[in-house]
Structure formats: C-alpha cells, structure tokens
Amino acid sequence: MSSIKINDSFILTSPSTSISQIKSELSNFEYVIVFDKHYYIFHTKEQFALQSASMSMPIIDWIHKTNWSPSTISTWLDLKTSKVNWERPVLIQAYETNSIHGVLHPSDWIHYLQAENEDVFSYFETLGETINDAVTVVDDKGKVVLWNTAAENTYKIAKQAIVGEFINTYFDDESIVLHKILNEGRPIRGAYHKPNKETHVLVNASPIVKGHKVIGAVATEHDITNIIRLHEEVEQDPLIGDKSLFSSIIGENSTLEEEIEMAKKVSSTNIPILLTGEVGSGKELLAQAIHYDSTRRNEPFITLNCATIPPGLIDMELFGYQQGVFSQPTTDKRPGKLEQAANGTLFIQDVHKMPLDVQIKLCDYLENAAYYMTGSNEQVQVNTRIMASTSVLLESLIEQGEFYEGLYYQLTVINIHIPPLKERQNEIPTLITQFIEEFSTKHEKVKPTLDEEVVETLCHHDWPGNVRELRNTIERLILLNDLPTITAQHLPAELKRQITLHEPLNETSSEKQLIQDTLKRTYGNKSAAADLLGISRGTLYNKIKEYGL
C-alpha cells in the first residue's frame, strides 16, 4: 500500500499576529496555522492574497474580512469516514495526544487515493484470476469493470474489448441478469442461464452495496456447456437391445424371482415405482424391462441421472425452461425430460441426489400430472410414468431433512429391491450366457465358450460392482479375445490372482512352486503367505519343512 505524504513544515501562531509576521513565517515554513475557534491555514504560495492588506493588520481581522475558509482537523484513522473540507489543506492530528502531526494538501490526498485504488484493483483483479469460473463485474450503469481470463475463454471475448463497455453490447440476456441485480439488490444462486447460443452456465450473482446503495454487481459463471452437449448428443441406447423384457436379469434366486414377478404385475399400470439396491445391481435393466413389458413399450424411455448433473441444473433438465427466463418473454422453450418422455417412462437414477425443492416440485407433478416450466406461467400437462432408483436408505435422509417425505410416499407405493449379486451367485451362469450372447452380437464376434476354470472363477467372485461389473467384464472378454475359447489367461489381473489363491495344493511340484511364488510375493512373510494360500500358518510351516524351502 502506498504511503501518504504529510507535510510537517508548519508553525502555529496566534490570531493577533500581524500580516507582516505571517509573511515572514511563510518564508521559513511551508504552512502557517492560525487558531481562533477554527484552524486557518496559509500556504507559502498563498502570500499573494495578503499583498493588498495592511502589514500591521492582525491576521484574524483579515480572515474575517475576506471570509477565509477554515481547515478541517482529523486523525488519520478518521480521515476517510469524517466530513472533510477538501477545498483547503487538512490538519492531521495525532490519535493518542491530539497534537498536530502535519498538514495534508488535497492534491497529495488525491495522489494517495489513486495509488490506493490501483492497489485495491490489483488485489481485486488477482482474486478474479484465482477463480476458475468466469467472473464479470459491472458498475451501477452496467459497464464492465472486471472480466477475467476464464470469462475470455468461456465467451471468446478479449478483456481489452469488453472492459469499459456496456455489457448489453455483447450479451442482451446477461445484461438483464445483472441489471436485475442492480435494480432489485437481491442475489442469485445456482441459476441456469444461456447467455448466447453456444454457452450454458450456472450463475451466482450478488449486488455490490455501498452504504444502502447498490453501486455494481458481480457474477461468477460456471461453464456447463460440455455437460449440456453430452446430454443433448447422447442417444438413448437401451441396455436391453432386443427388448427381451426380463431375460437380462432373470435368475434362479427365489428372492429375485419374487421381485421380478411383482415387476411384471405392475408393468401394465401407471403407478410410480422405486427400485432399490446397491450400485450396479441392475436397477436400470429392471426399469427398462418393466417399460418394455408395458403398454408404453413403443413410447420413449428416458433417463435422468441426478448424480451426474449439477444440482442447479436438475430442475431445468427435469421440467424444462423458457428461453427468456432471464430476458424478455419469448415463446422459445426447451422441454425437460418429463415432456420428452411423454406417454412413455422417465427413469430417475439416484433420486436421493435431487435437490429438495425439485423433489417437492416432482411430488406436485405426481399428484396433479401437471407442472410449470421455469420462467413460464403456462401449465404443462403430460402423461409420463415415473420410475426412480436409489442405493441409499431414503428413510434416513427423511429423518435428516434431506429427502421430501411426500415424494417418498408417492414413489414407494411399489418398492422393488434388487439383492446384490453376491447373494445371487447361483444365477451368475445364466447372466454370463446372456451377456456373451448380447456382446457377441453387438461387436459382431463369434460367440466363444468359456473354459471351466473361467466359469468357476466368475461364479465365485464377490462382484462388488454387482451386475454392472459382471457385464463389463464379459464385454471386455468378448472385445479382447478372438479365440473360440476364453481361458484363465484372458481374465483381468484381479480374477487371475483369485485363481492363483484358490488353486488346490495337490501335485507336489506345483504345490512347491506355488508356495515359493507366494513367499516371494509376501517377501518371506509367512503369516501373509498362509493367508494368501488359504491354509493355516502351521500347515505352511510343515510344507516348508517338507519341501526344504
């Protein structure tokens, strides 16, 4: 921060001092200060004002005769907040002793404020550049004061071109957003906005307030264009390519069969369904099976994944919005997933990630079959069936105030739980056969057979990623193998390791080699080696002694 220039070349004199003496003192000091109820300051360059006066006249008489303006006295700490007469030099008073510390000329104060303003703006600009999001600051007239590098990259407009210009020169909609802040003085948080045809952002904006007056506005914009494009470009690619209903998830596990029977019974109804189960357990597969087994099978099946969309965008994605929400009213609308799935099914994944206010709005739709787009007063009525999924206990979220109880009761009229794959190991062979058929057709490969050892390994694996992990593993095996038979060498490393750990210790040579390899892997740690081999430490010691290891 720049230091201020305070002049200490001054002398205090009485009001009875003659003009002649005042002029004499001004040749020795830069300032002469006269005190008589008020402080009156004379600068050495102001001697000309005294030329026509009688040299013997007391200075106080001349002051009264000419209405010479008094000066303000202030401490340095109070200088910015107190009322100061800047038409005259200001006396700076010591805070502790009340003695006069020096004289501050208005021009020196201006230079100081200019330097201070430059310093503050440097801090301000550096802060703006430290933020990864686009930052825009406008004054109370809507002129751009700050435009950071992220804003340049987002909007492809150089800082030199836009700073100092009215923002509506470039963005009509964006100008209205910030003008709304300027006019109303209320902040905006997490609002979706489309400032031009190519860019989608989430906006946080706040007024800049001085006293009780709004003097500007600042907005940060998080670029979500890539997310929007991804959602717009990805075509619906049903996991059940042949629409074979429940064939991709049917197994021999009695619990799952009961759940599937329930799913079949409700598939022809319009009742909302909640699917629960661990991540990857096959909830989307079951949702599609229900859809394709219903009378809506020829209508859209649309998904909305609440875990992959920014919270501030979920409302727009679900219910849509009117393009003029941040500008002048317009008939240009973007339908949401509910409308895109009209007469079909909307499957909401990870519904527990949906913001609470959107949950309430969805509950209203389920009750009334109608809703309002963001930015529109026109009610939209659509006939869309809702299915939702979650991998958490919604009851716990309700207790914590993070899930709307009304929506919970709407969704759980039919609640279907899918057990994890580790509880359904006897159906893994059926799923393996199904996936081999599916991916051989999809990738135009000759359908291979699986070695018995591979099948056994796949059936005994825990599959923490559930059906999704098994499905991805089979697709990998199909993609990377051109041989008629898939053997253990084609398995991923984790599954190969599982085979090694469970190899029977039968033949002496292979048993000895296996123990040697395991000891090498554990750097001679016998307890760890015994755990890997699946035998007791005592048995391992006996084997080591037997083979002379």
Image (cartoon, rainbow, N blue to C red):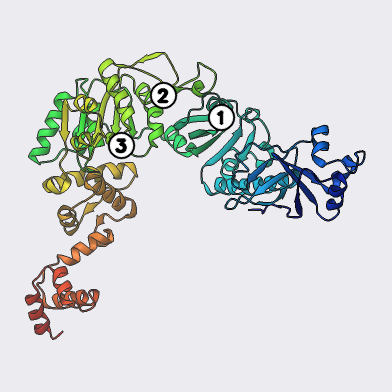
Q: Which of marks 3 and 2 is nearer the N terminus?
A: 2
Q: Name the residue under label 1.
A: 214
Q: What kind of element bears circle 1?
A: strand
> Label 1, label 3: how many angstroms apart (C-alpha)?
36 Å
Q: What kind of element bears circle 2?
A: strand
Q: Which residue extends farthest bottom?
A: 548
Amino acid beneath label 3: Lys
- Residue 233 in percent (x, y) is at 45, 34
- Residue 178 in percent (x, y) is at 55, 29
Amino acid beneath label 1: Val
Q: Is residue 181 above or below residue 451?
A: above
Count of residue discs = 3
**Location of residue 489 by image quarter:** bottom left
Residue at (13% x, 72% y) in the render: 530
Left or right, residue 165 beside residue 496 = right
Q: Which mark is residue 353?
A: 3
